[in-house]
Each structure stands twice: as structure tokens, then as C-alpha cells.
Image (cartoon, rainbow, N blue to C red):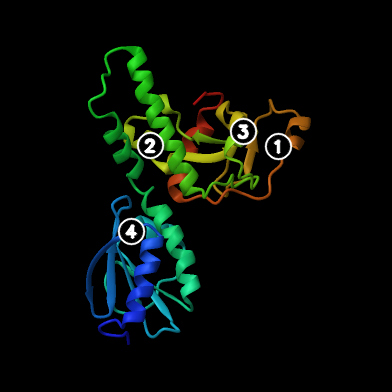
Amino acid sequence: MFEVPQSFVISQECQKVAWQNGYRRPMAEADGWARYGSTTAKGTVWLAAVGQGGPWFLALDHSGVIEELDQSAAVIPGPGLARFAYPSLAALYDVMHRVYQLAVSLPDGPLDEFRDAVRGLPKTTEAERLIIQRVGQDIFRDRLMTYWQGRCPLTGITDPALLRASHIIAWKDCESDAERLDVHNGLLLSALWDAAFDRGLVTFDDAGQPEFSSAVSETARAELRWQGPIPLTDKHRARLVWHRANPFIQN
């Protein structure tokens, strides 16, 4: 089915797709599949093609990425946990960008970065603990920006200065750093929505639709404009149960 071994052109195109999307560690090729790893993203990817005109194929071994890609796997043999087919090289480029975004965020990319950043830092005084907390919150924001593709899913706002990393389960109420830094414990919201969410004046149902507190005036509700529901995973929904049960808690 695939070129075995890959021709020079196919090999070069696979390398460019991988390199330009964060997978810059070439690994062994087998059965027409070229494998690549990353120093920043979890998991590896395999790329293959039938010919220069496609179709093109992607195999993944990262279960979290596979789950959130929300694409139908191709019923073909090959490496990894799932294989996907794309009609053109451009389509493969598009999906690879999202694969990398998810792979650096799931499941514990932010936690690994946090541990590296604070290793050896003193934690004796309250001031020192606040510095460590700020490091964690900055990493959490960066990874939420990646996960949500730099866009508030409610409003479509993409201006970084107007976006906030909103914890679902409050930082102080998380039982571990892993929970605090899990991207499924956060929403990237515009500043006004973040303020309302942070104070328990608004939450979200399992469909991602806003639910307003009775304390929010009709005028305020009218100003809290939104384009559509938030696309949630089951992991977001599980944490929103906590948020709905704990109104008026500051993150």
C-alpha cells in the first residue's frame, strides 16, 4: 500500500511536516512509516503516503491526543494506537499543528514543566511559596493558550491581553499540583467572563452553555455576549460539577 522504503520526495515531505510541527527527532522507518519524536511533546508520530499525490497517513501512540482529535480512525494496519488518512498534504499539515498543541498539553506536560522550573527553589516562607504558585499559574496560562488555540471559546476573542486562565476547581482547593496544572481544569475566557466565572456568577452545564446566578442582573447578562457553547470534554465536565456545587469561590 505504501512506498517501501519511502522515496526521496515522500521522505522529504514527511520530514518537513514533522519538523515544522514540533517533531524534530527522526527515528527509524519501517514498512513505509517514518517515525518522529519531540523533545517537548509527549508521544511519537508516524507518517506515510501512497504516492506524492497522496493520500497521506498519520499514526499516533498518544491516547489523549487521539481522543481529543475527534476524528475517525482509518481501518488500516500500522503502528501506534490509531491511524488517520488525509486526502492531501495540506490536510495533514493542518492536523499536525493540532496534534502538537495537544501533545504538549496532555496529560502532564504543564506539570513536568512546572517541576523543572521550581526544582531547587526554596519553599519555606509564604513569599517563597507565592513565587512558586506564580510560576505554576504562568505555565498553566501558557498551556491553556496552546490548548484553546489562543481563543476564548465563548466569544472568539484572541487578544492575549484580554484572555484569562480560569481554573474550574480553584487552585487552593486542588489536591495536587497535577490537578492544578491539568489543562482540563481550566478554561481560557475573556476578562469579563473570567471575572464572572471566578466569582461563581456564571458556570457551565455539560453542553457548555452558560448558567447564570440569580445575582447577575439582566443588564449584565445582556453584556456578557457569547457566540456558542464551550466544546467540553468529559474531563472538563467532571470538574464543572465541582464548580457548580461551589458558587462564589474565588480561584
Q: CA distance from mark 4 to mark 3?
A: 33 Å
* Residue depth check, mark 2 versus mark 4: number of the one nearer the observer: 2
Above or below: residue 226 compared with residue 117: below
* Residue depth check, mark 4 versus mark 3: number of the one nearer the observer: 3
Precedes in sequence: disc 4 or disc 3: 4
Q: In the image, 230: left or right of 168?
A: right
Under mark 2, the amino acid is Leu
- Which residue is at 32% across, 35% downward? 114
Q: Nearer the viewer, residue 207 or 136?
A: 136
According to the picture, the residue beneath numbered tag 3 turns out to be: 191
Q: Position of residue 118 (x, y in %)?
A: 29, 29
Q: Are marks 4 and 1 in contact (CB under 8 Å)?
A: no
Q: In the image, 204: left or right of 227?
A: left
Q: Which mark is residue 181?
A: 2
Precedes in sequence: disc 2 or disc 4: 4
- Which residue is at 30% across, 53% downward? 42
Q: Are marks 2 and 3 in contact (CB under 8 Å)?
A: no
Find residue 192 and report its image quarter: top right
According to the picture, the residue beneath numbered tag 1 turns out to be: 224
Q: Nearer the viewer, residue 237 or 33?
A: 33
Which element is circle 1 on? loop
According to the picture, the residue beneath numbered tag 4 turns out to be: 63
Under mark 4, the amino acid is Ser
- Which residue is at 27% across, 18% downward? 123
Q: Position of residue 242 (x, y in %)?
A: 47, 34
Precedes in sequence: disc 4 or disc 1: 4
Find residue 197 and report its image quarter: top right
Which element is circle 4 on? helix
